[in-house]
Amino acid sequence: MADQRYRIDTARGRLVLGRFEIPVPRSRAGRIVTGTALVGGGLLGFLPVLGFWMVPLGLVVLSHDLAFVRRRRRRAAVWWSRRRAARNKPPATD
């Protein structure tokens, strides 16, 4: 599990984003409320202090407990990695 860059470490109650760690509630209800608040605040990203960065962070928190959010996040991650791989692929020479 140490090779995953983005995950929730349930043993320590932290959201791991690369080398950054953010504390999250250990209860399921607390994580759902926190994730929903982050997504809701992110939709108001045009206001000061709030930002659109809150939407993906809220979705990562929600994906830990909600299967339909987890499936959508995984599909987006697979799509993004395939897109990046296609862009980084050297052009074919004939």
Image (cartoon, rainbow, N blue to C red):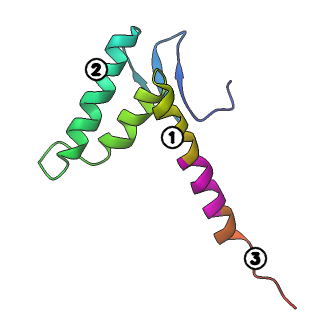
77 on left or right of 89 = left
Q: Secondary structure at mark 2?
A: helix
**Which numbered tag is attached to residue 33?**
2
The amino acid beneath tag 3 is Pro
12 on left or right of 36 = right
The amino acid beneath tag 2 is Val
Q: Quadrant of residue 66?
A: top left
Query: As drawn, which residue projects farthest toward the bottom?
Result: 94
Q: Identify the mark nearer the N-term, 2 or 1.
A: 2
Residue at point 38%, 18% (across, down): 24
Report the quarter where the N terminus lies: top right
Closer to the camera: disc 3 or disc 2?
Answer: 2
* As drawn, 44 above or below 82: above
**Which numbered tag is attached to residue 37?**
none
Does the magenta stretch mainly form a helix, a strand or a loop? helix
| Residue that label 1 marks | 73
Q: CA distance from mark 3 to mark 1?
A: 28 Å
| Residue that label 3 marks | 90
